[in-house]
Image (cartoon, rainbow, N blue to C red):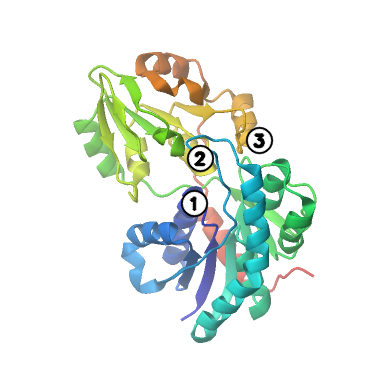
Amino acid sequence: MKTIGYYVSDTGFGHITRSLALIERILEESDYQVYLVSGRTQIEYAKIYLIPYEDRVIYQITETEAKTVYFENTLTTDIKTTEKNVEKFIRKLPELLEKELETLKDIALDCVITDLSLLGIEVAKALNVKKIGLSNYTWYHRYRKKGIKEEFIGYYLKLYNELDMFYQLAMADRMDGLTCPIADGGHLMRRVNFLASVDLKKMYWPAMYLSIGQIARKKDMIINFQSGHVFAAGALTATGDAHVINLPNKISHSQDYLMASSLALIKPGWATVMECLILGKPFGIIVSEDTEDEELIEKLRALDCCFSLHEDALDYLDVKKLNVKAVHTKRVKVSDDTAATAKKILKFIKSDKVSK
């Protein structure tokens, strides 16, 4: 069976979330099977989401990216530890590549898509198949902004520029120095089960969707939302005048809960921001002095489509006041380009185009 290799950075859930949205459409639109490679947490999550296609997906657990380390329960990057991790990962790449090629002896890949793991590019080069990248930023530019030395990250840019095509997602960061062919990747999100979201609305209304990443572990929160409900993603502990529903860590359809909410308060990762924009949900973002998604935040502020809240203000949330903030923002609803991007990628895979 024709097979697409799909390598996903094993950092958090943002990369795997949008990758699953695309993989689902690729499987629908083609007869390819997918060889999906990422970290253990991401693969376990993917197995739940892709159950309808379990006979067409091969899973492989491995290290696909250097680990960005944050100071405990904050959005602030531990630069020294992260730099050491980047150096270790680059040195380990040959070993990771060798293991992958051993696994792939019995699997013939037609191409590799990567979001945005160097390992995927190395594998594609070794197998002499198309190398397709997809992201709203590159690790090279993120690491450079954090102040990590060029001697450790220069190899990232070198490999990115060997991509046959890079699909740049909507609201992407600036990527100076990227010289590979670039195409529009649009706005992506997982498909919503509208019947499920309607049922959730009947049971829990009004509701706020709360997804704030590891800050949720920082301390107990007090939420004032009289007669309201809170769909809380992650390890959140909250008290107060609100009905808090803690969603399972590996829930595969958090987008249905977002759809059923009247307001969202989120860590401004690309995948969740796109879900809010595509679904037309009023939302707020959590910011700090060291926010890695600062360029995305700048774009959102320019559109005036959300309000912002500093992470220090999370001790006490008055949802009524948050709703007032949301009312004064613009409703910016964007298109869902997931199906179109999947078709675009499939067309490119079948074409004769490769980078020189």
Task: Quickly name the residue at label 3.
Answer: 295
Q: Which mark is residue 274?
A: 2
Q: Which residue: 64% across, 76% down? A: 129
Measured from the top left, where is residue 206 in percent x and y? 28, 24
Residue 204 left/right relative to 269: left
- Check disc 1 and give the amino acid type: Arg
Task: Quickly name the residue at label 1.
Answer: 18
| Residue farthest to the left, as pictured | 203
Mark nearest the camera among 1 and 3 is 3
Q: Nearer the viewer, residue 311 or 268?
A: 311
Please say whether residue 128 is visible from this viewpoint. Answer: no
C-beta proximity under 8 Å, tags 1 and 2: yes
Mark nearest the camera among 3 and 2 is 3
Residue 183, picture quadrant: bottom right
Measured from the top left, where is residue 41 in percent x and y? 41, 57
Q: Which residue: 45% across, 16% down? A: 327
Q: Nearer the viewer, residue 293 or 356?
A: 293
Q: Secondary structure under badge 1?
A: helix
